[in-house]
Image: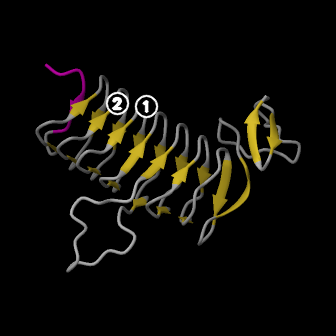
Amino acid sequence: MSDYFVHESSYVDENVSIGKDTKIWHFCHVQSGAVIGERCSMGQNVNIGNNVKIGNGVRIQNNVSVYEGVEIEDNVFCGPSCVFTNVNTPRAHFPVHGKYAKTKICEGASLGANCTVVCGHTVGKSALIAAGAVVTKDVKPYALMAGVPARQIGWVCECGRRLNDSLECSCGRKYEENNGLITPL
């Protein structure tokens, strides 16, 4: 008996590692070489591509495909139908043969429903990408990003709330800014 759950309608290929207490729900596919951490949840119709690495405590909502070349660190939230790409100039008649642009979603980041993360970029620690935004460049840690293309409209706390002009959160956490980046106090 395994220490994780896979719904009977899902497929898990050979050579996959799935951590304790992870749940893989209806109509999912986990492809060869994937590594999924502990306490993760894959909603309905999630595809985890070959050789993808997913950290602990990750929540991937319905209808998300995480393609080869994407790495997701611990405690990341991927909203429903968010999109990852892995090739900057895709052409059916010029395949890339495994040469994928790397995309990294750092610890504690949240990706809103229907947002797109164009490959080759990093979304920083605890950043928040608004629903429907299109990320076309690297995102700073704790940045609040919205729009098409996504632009920074503020800062967010580790808890996800927007910081005020003094870089304080209603939860009590405080931050300081140095050289265009913020860090917790």
- Which x, y percent locates residue 172? 79, 29
Residues packed near mark 2 inside 10 Å, few (<14), some (14 to 19) or many (20 plus): many
Q: Are circles 2 and 1 on residues that touch, CB within 8 Å?
A: yes
- Which x, y percent locates residue 100? 32, 59
Report the residue that reaches farthest toward the right.
166
- The range drawn in magenta is 1-7
Q: Which mark is residue 84?
A: none
Would you name the residue on which mark 2 appears?
37
Q: Which quarter of the figure has residue 35?
A: top left
Rendered residue at 49%/34% (across/down): 75
Look at the image and say whether residue 31 sits in the magenta stretch. no
- Which x, y percent locates residue 15? 14, 36
Q: Is residue 3 above or below residue 178?
A: above
Q: Which quarter of the figure has residue 135?
A: bottom right
Question: What predominant SS class does the magenta segment belong to?
Answer: loop
Q: Measure the C-alpha gap from mark 2 to mark 1.
A: 7 Å
Report the residue that reaches farthest toward the left.
14
Would you name the residue on which mark 1 appears?
57
Rendered residue at 25%/41% (across/down): 34
